[in-house]
Amino acid sequence: MAYKIPSLTVDIFIFNEKREFILIKRKNDPFKDHWALPGGFVDYGETTEHAAVREAKEETSIDVELIKLFNVYSEPDRDPRGHTVTIFYLANGDLSQAKADDDAKDFGIFSFDDLDSLDIAFDHKMILNEVKDYFNEE
């Protein structure tokens, strides 16, 4: 019997001391030209922590320090390409080093006040609002 297995991904909230954060503009479908958290698929044999650091570097050119495993998102319909489970990390990084790379068409540095004015991919607006709530509770 063949089993259908969800894909495993990581997403990273890269922020600075002012709680500004980076989003990438997607180069490819789905959600081409929408803003998204940096992230991507975990390679076979790779830890999710390594994947998060690698994807951050590949998409933003930023070397990050993972701060916290924030949450796991696993709704089967969260990605139109199929069932993906995302391990989501908070990470510190020097946003001044940012450069769009890999499958990122562009990048932007934002604050939580910008969220309502952005076209955001996947369920990333919900995730960003959860991070905002988390920071407001600190």
Image (cartoon, rainbow, N blue to C red):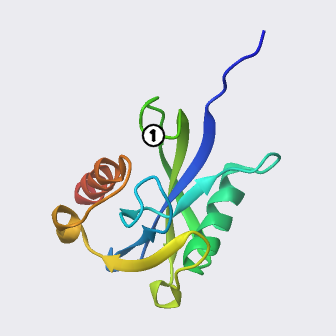
**Most foreground residue, 106 or 50:** 106
Quarter of the image where the N terminus is located: top right
Q: What residue sits right under mark 1 in the picture?
A: 80
Q: Amino acid at mark 1?
A: Pro
**Most foreground residue, 44 or 137:** 44
Task: Find residue 50 and report its horizontal and vertical position in percent.
Answer: 71, 59
Task: Find residue 67 and report its horizontal and vertical position in percent.
Answer: 53, 62
Image-based side of 3 in relation to 63, left or right: right
* Above-or-below relation of 112 to 11: below
* Above-or-below relation of 89 to 104: above
**Most foreground residue, 36 or 93:** 36
Q: Which residue shows up at 32% across the image and 56% down it?
A: 128
Task: Find residue 15 and report its horizontal and vertical position in percent.
Answer: 42, 73
Image-based side of 43 in relation to 107, left or right: right
* Quarter of the view holding residue 4: top right
Image-based side of 127 in relation to 55, left or right: left
* Above-or-below relation of 1 to 131: above
| Count of marks placed on residues | 1
Q: Residues within 10 Å of mark 1 (few under 14, many from 20)?
A: few
Task: Find residue 102 and report its horizontal and vertical position in percent.
Answer: 62, 73
Q: Which residue shows up at 44% across the image and 79% down it?
A: 106
Q: Which residue shows up at 75% across the image and 50% down it?
A: 43
Quarter of the image where the C terminus is located: bottom left
Which residue, as the protein is rendered here, is positioned at the far bottom? 96
Which residue, as the protein is rendered here, is positioned at the far right? 45
Circle 1 SS class = loop
Q: Which residue shows up at 78% across the image and 51% down it?
A: 46
